[in-house]
Image: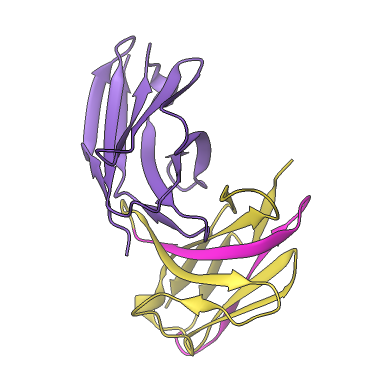
Amino acid sequence: GENVEQHPSTLSVQEGDSAVIKCTYSDSASNYFPWYKQELGKRPQLIIDIRSNVGEKKDQRIAVTLNKTAKHFSLHITETQPEDSAVYFCAASTNAGKSTFGDGTTLTVKP
Amino acid sequence: GAVVSQHPSRVICKSGTSVKIECRSLDFQATTMFWYRQFPKKSLMLMATSNEGSKATYEQGVEKDKFLINHASLTLSTLTVTSAHPEDSSFYICSANPRGGKNIQYFGAGTRLSVL
C-alpha cells in the first residue's frame, strides 16, 4: 500500500519567516496530493492541493511543489503569521479516493 | 458549500454500551465517505471506506463487527462502536468525497468518544 513520510515533525519559525514541510510517497499511482491544516480539537481543513499533472501551485502565501519522478511534494508558507500555528498534514491518494496521511508537522510561529 | 456535519461532537458512555456517530454531507452528494480515528498528537488513521449502498471496506486490523458502518444514502454514513471499552476512547473523524469531486475530501468536525 501507499506510504507517506512527512518531515519535520515539529517546526518553529519566527513571524515573517518562511516554513517548508516535505513529504514523500511510495505509490506511483497516487495522483492527488492535498495539504490540511488542523488546529487543536478541530477538523482538518484543506489549504491547498496539487494534482500529478502540475508541478507547482500557489495561493497567496501558500505554495505546493510536486516532483513526480522523485515522488516528493512540499508545502511552502511565506511571511508566516502566528495564526499559521497548527498541525499540517500531507496526504496522497489515487483515483480510488482513499488517502494516506503523513504523520503531521506541528508548526509554531513565534511573534 | 461542501459542509460535512458530524454528530455528536462529544460523547461519554459506560463500558459495554454502543455509540452511534453520524456523518452527513449537507450540500452535496457523497458517493464515498471515510472514517478515521485520531489519537492525541497523531495522524489520521483510516478505519474504513464507506460506499453508498454497499458494504464498507475495512482497513487491516480494524474489526468490522466492532465498528459497524452503514452508508444508507448519498448524504449519510453512520459509525457504531459496539460494546465500547475504554481503549475505544478516541477522536473519530469522518470525511466525504463529493460525487465527481476528484478525490477531494471534506471533513466533519469529529467526535470525541470517552468510554468510562
Image side of residue B97 versus residue B113, left or right: right
- Relative horizontal placement of residue A31, taking residue A9 as reference (left or right): right
Residue at image position (35%, 23%) is A76
The colour of chain B is yellow
Q: Residue at x 59, y 71 (%)?
A: B50
Q: Nearer the viewer, residue B92 or A76?
A: A76
Q: Which region is colored magenta?
A: B15-39
Give left or right: position of A35 versus B97: left
Q: Does any portion of residue B38 appear in the rendered image?
A: yes
- Residue in the foreground of this view, choosing between B14 and A96: A96
Residue B38 picture quarter: bottom left
Residue B48 % position (x, y): 49, 72
Q: Nearer the viewer, residue B75 or A106?
A: B75
**Which quadrant of the figure has residue B94?**
bottom right
Q: Quadrant of the N terminus of chain B?
A: top right
Residue at image x 47%, y 35%?
A53
Q: Main secondary structure of the magenta part?
A: strand
The image quadrant where one finds the C terminus of chain B is bottom left
Measured as percent of width and height from the top left, residue A1 is found at 32, 65
**Residue B33 to residue A49: above or below:** below
* The magenta stretch spans residue B27: yes
Confirm whether the magenta stretch covers residue A82: no
Q: Is residue A38 visible?
A: no
Q: Residue at the spot x=32%, y=21% of the render?
A: A109
Q: What letter labels the chain drawn in purple?
A: A
Name the foreground residue: A34 vs B12.
A34
Residue B100: horizontal and vertical position, in percent?
69, 51
